[in-house]
Image: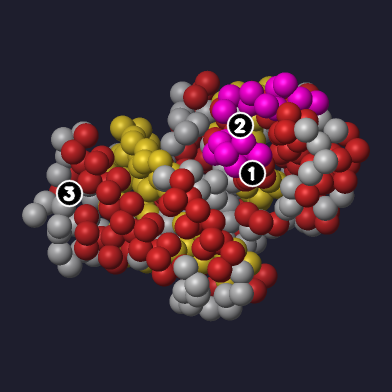
Amino acid sequence: MKSMMTALGLMSGTSMDGIDAALIETDGEGQVVMGPSLSLAYSHDERDLLRRALADALPMERRTERPGGLAAAERLVGRRHADLVGDFLRTHALAPDDIDIVGFHGQTVLHRPLLRLTVQIGDGQALADEIGIPVVHDMRAADVAAGGQGAPLVPAYHHALVQAAGLGGPVAVLNLGGVGNVTYLDGAQDPIAFDTGPANALIDDLMLERTGAAMDKDAGYALAGHADEAVLAHLMAHPYFDEKPPKSLDRNAFSREAVASLSTEDAAATLAAFTARSAAASRRWLPRPPALWVVCGGGARNPAILDFLRRETGAGVRTADDVGWSAAMMEAQAFAYLAVRSLKGLPLTFPSSTGVPRRLTGGVLARPLRNRLSA
């Protein structure tokens, strides 16, 4: 067996609801042993600060700029990630030395790969200093600098899980965070992957605007409403869906203005159907229609999206939990896995997943200069 490492992955996604931490043991290839996890929810005020940071990031032209409230948001991201690591260590009776590496995604505030620009706020060196554990961060930058889309990054982990589970192909792993992305897997081939369209971001924004809630919990609104086919047709006319992969999206690439005249129930149902229909439409770019769709991310907890996806694809639809994975912690686990691959110089991205010219590793290693958590 190749050398195993203990890695902690940290993920703050485009839905901006909080941070997930997940521990795995892995060789960075086909061996993965899942460990414990823990989450930290952002407060209402913290989510507001991050949302303002998205707006402040729009005029950015250089990755190092921090206009408006971005500097404050970056400090918040670093502080809350350090808090979560501290909580994780205490909860599971671990010391910093028990973890070989931390994979730190940071918070995406801008993603414009055509301009070779992607920005994830969060200071990896400061985090390493705070927690006393080496940190691999900035995992998208190398791919974007080389002409790739910089997303999705999780397919390498999906590939390992599907192979380990012995799932017969073709299999589509559909991650529904703020934005949706699909990984197509068929045997030992490199994964084919790209962003499919919106996922939870539009629904979450709708709920926040109309109800003050952070999400449509258990799809209570969507299941009580009806999808408007005329609005759906308008949403699906977006030019993104005719673009050939590789391709990726910024969180704000789609607008919910089209559902403005609908009731909250019908608007939520329409946006849930939009998530499913745009995912199903990705089949036009795949070699064969997937026989099985495995759904992870927050969208796996939305029964309306799952029902729409079954209708749209006519294929088997299961959640990651159904196949023994973790729907909620998939991305956090993936960044732990990618951190190990980065340390070993293994590719994080592939021509078939991001359009990068060749298989490419990535990430920046920050070694701690001090250790406050164990002080």
The residue indicated by pointer 2 is: 216
Picture residue at 66% right of the left edge, 39% below the top = 210
Q: Nearer the viewer, residue 183 or 114?
A: 114
Picture residue at 78% right of the left edge, 49% below the top = 257
The residue indicated by pointer 1 is: 209
Magenta: main secondary structure: helix
Residue 239 shows in the view: yes
Picture residue at 61% right of the left edge, 31% below the top = 216
Marks 2 and 3 sit apart, C-alpha to C-alpha, by: 37 Å
Q: Which residue type carries mark 3?
A: Pro
Checking the image for residue 96, the label placed there is: 3
Marks 1 and 2 sit apart, C-alpha to C-alpha, by: 12 Å
Question: 127 left or right of 94?
Answer: right
Mark 1 or 3, closer to the camera? 1
Residue 169: horizontal and vertical position, in percent? Answer: 64, 31
Q: Quadrant where the C terminus lies?
A: bottom left
Residue 324: horizontal and vertical position, in percent? Answer: 46, 23
Residue 186 lies, with reference to residue 83, above or below; the image says above
Q: Secondary structure at mark 2?
A: loop
Q: Secondary structure at mark 1?
A: helix
Q: Secondary structure at mark 3?
A: helix
Q: Are marks 1 and 2 in contact (CB under 8 Å)?
A: no
Please check the rendered image and state whether residue 141 is part of the magenta-colored stretch, yes or no: no
Figure disc tally: 3
Picture residue at 64% right of the left edge, 44% below the top = 209
Whichever of labels 1 and 3 marks the residue nearer the N terminus, that label is 3
Residue 216 lies, with reference to residue 239, above or below; the image says above
Residue 315 shows in the view: no
Marks 1 and 3 sit apart, C-alpha to C-alpha, by: 41 Å
Q: Are marks 2 and 3 in contact (CB under 8 Å)?
A: no
Residue 127: horizontal and vertical position, in percent? Answer: 28, 60
